[in-house]
Amino acid sequence: MTFHGVDAAKQFKHMREVVPEQYRAFLDFDGKVFADGALPVKTKELIALGIAQITQCPWCIDAHAKRAVKAGASDSEVGEVTFVAMAMAAGAAWSHGGLAFQCVDEHRARA
């Protein structure tokens, strides 16, 4: 898959060649994190998909959408995850609006 002109497969291969132990350790960690546990794989993949939308990582969106579908996620579940991600992003902007006003107040007080 290519996003933003980056051939991810080629670059991941290069990464694997230059830091093989770290590369393998990450894949092992990732495999353990996304295995069935207290949360089923589908739930974990839907969570990851929502986080990927917030972090705006096209590679992660693609990978976790694929894995969510493989785990049985429906269009409705993906749609709800998208709206949860939207609400979280809006909530962060809303709460940071309070920080912005606090900073404005502090700068005005110093002026």
Image (tube, rainbow, N blue to C red):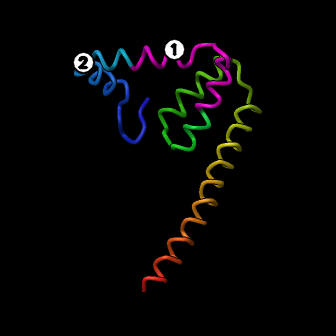
Q: Amino acid at mark 1?
A: Lys
Q: Residue at x 47, y 33 (%)?
A: 59
Q: Are marks 2 and 1 in contact (CB under 8 Å)?
A: no
Q: Secondary structure at mark 1?
A: helix
* Residue 3 left/right relative to 99: left
Percent x, y of residue 42 = 67, 21
Magenta-tinted stretch: 26-48
Percent x, y of residue 39 = 67, 19
**Closer to the N terminus: mark 2 or mark 1?**
2
Percent x, y of residue 4 = 40, 42
Which image quarter: residue 65?
top right
Q: Looking at this view, is 68 or 102 the one in front? A: 102
Percent x, y of residue 84 = 70, 43
Which residue is most to the left? 18
Q: In the drawing, what numbered circle is on residue 32?
A: 1
Q: Secondary structure at mark 2?
A: helix
Circle 2 Cα neighbour tier, 10 Å, few/some/many (<14 / 14–19 / ≥20): few
Q: On the image, numbered disc 2 is attached to which residue?
A: 17
Give the quadrant of the N terminus: top left
Q: Amino acid at mark 2?
A: Glu
Give the quadrant of the C terminus: bottom left
